Image: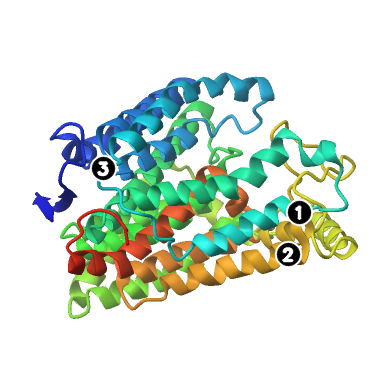
Amino acid sequence: MTKRSGKFAYGTCDNLFGCADKLFSSPLYLTTLVAVCSISYAFSAYAAGFWLCAVAMSISLVCTRNVMPAFAAFIFCTISVIEQYAITYEGIFGYAGVLAIVIPALIFHIIKYAPGRRGYTPCKMFAPQLAVSCALLLGGAGSIGLKEYFSLPSIYYMLFLGFVLLAIMVFCDCDMPADRRYVSEYIARTLMAAALLFCIMWVIAFIRDGAEDFPYRQWKNNAGNFMLIAMPLTVWKAARSKFGVLYLCFAIVQITSVILSGSRGATLCIVATFLPTAVLYLRAIRGQKARFYAELALAAAGCVVLASVFLTNGAARLVNLVGDMDILDGNGREELYLLGLKNMLDKPLFGVGIGYINEQAWQLNDMAIFWYHSTPVQVAASMGAAGGIAYLWQFLARIRLALHKNHYSLTILLSFLGFAGYSCINTGDFTPLPFGVLIVMLMLSLERYNYDLPALFKSGRNFMRGK
């Protein structure tokens, strides 16, 4: 049976210490992660932020069966080192020491919480992810050389987008709480905390550069991806809270930061998704239209104040940014798309492989694969028809999973569609850490919200999916 403590339900005997679940589910935990990463970013101590978040992840794995706190720490681990996008092999192996604490914690978690872990029933995304995993390994079959196929970047992307991500899905599915309210709230709070961290990082960058213009950072595209997922969840949270105006203000701050960052594709996608998100919000508070208009007015006023405080000539720069917006404005994407089309036509069945290299077209960093800057093009060129079928199956399965008539499911649908739309010109969903794992968790949360919980409660089971 399930024991309720405070606002959420926890399974019995599922944590090492009685207070573990309560501590990791408190606002203090996420606040601490935000503070750690903010301070480390301010002092350019990226490794310190990474290691501290990795320690938090390991401690949560040891102390509780609940994987949500470990997931949150993982997200902050990836953000803490986001400035080091051009990291070398030497730098990567310097971070590999983190496995010395994470792997033992993971092994302890698996063994410690084995009692009560029932036999695994494949989730709805298991078969599509398995198909994608196979397509990734088959990419380039018959055309790519062994050196390119077994290069470190190729192996990393093939495995971590494929079978490693499948294993992560199984692990998280096994130890994710059945309480749909808890899971959905935790997902939303984690993404809002990540969005808050990016906003703080933008302020730090603005102060550090000491310039009138909004600072340029290479990670603006990754920040845009996070905001695309977080913004609809922030508005969803606004509809559920008596402090909805604060969440609406924060959602508009997220949109503003994306626009001013200069990430043109993310700007188009976040503006497009905000409109249906606002409609969903209005429907959720049907009968409270006065509240909606009052909160919207207050949120807009708050953003004007924010812009006047932090931005010089912010309105003029915003007008110029919109006027200059052109996704294909001399950034080389057209050539990459044409090359991807050529590679797909040359190798239609399995593509040219993830490890494909073309130094004449693109100089790669140490851990980079050849980016076509479009997920459909990336899939078609790298994996051919086999990959196209697998990824299309996965995409449609995700859409179907989100098509339920409740506010949370439709919110996740908008988050996913905004992210997927941006990936058509940025390939964000071809980044296994963090976005591959993040999308997996979003889909698992939908299963908890729409399928697992009623079945588990009806059968009297308390925590796990099982036979």
- Checking the image for residue 139, the label placed there is 1
Label 2: element kind: helix
Image position of 205 (left or right of 379)? left
Residue count near mark 2 (Cα–Cα under 10 Å), binned few <14, some 14–19, many ≥20: many
Q: Position of residue 220 (x, y in %)?
A: 56, 44
Q: Is residue 406 visible?
A: yes
Instruction: Identify the residue shown where x is 64% and y is 65%.
Output: 390
Quadrant location of residue 61?
top left
Residue type at the position of mark 1: Gly
Q: Position of residue 7 (x, y in %)?
A: 12, 52
Residue type at the position of mark 3: Pro
Image position of 374 (left or right of 313)? right
- Checking the image for residue 115, the label placed there is 3
> In the image, is residue 67 above or below residue 382?
above
Q: Nearer the viewer, residue 251 or 203?
A: 251
**How far is the residue under mark 2 from the one under mark 3?**
40 Å
- Checking the image for residue 401, the label placed there is none
Instruction: Identify the residue shown where x is 46% and y is 54%.
Output: 440
Q: Nearer the viewer, residue 111 or 254?
A: 111
Which comes before the other along the chain, label 1 or label 3? 3
**How far is the residue under mark 1 from the one under mark 2?**
8 Å
Which comes before the other along the chain, label 1 or label 2? 1
Label 3: element kind: loop
Q: Position of residue 219 (x, y in %)?
A: 57, 40
Residue count near mark 3 (Cα–Cα under 10 Å), binned few <14, some 14–19, many ≥20: few
Q: Give the residue pinned by disc 2.
A: 386
- The quarter of the rendered structure image containing the N terminus is bottom left
Quadrant location of residue 24?
top left
Residue type at the position of mark 2: Ala
Residue count near mark 1 (Cα–Cα under 10 Å), binned few <14, some 14–19, many ≥20: many
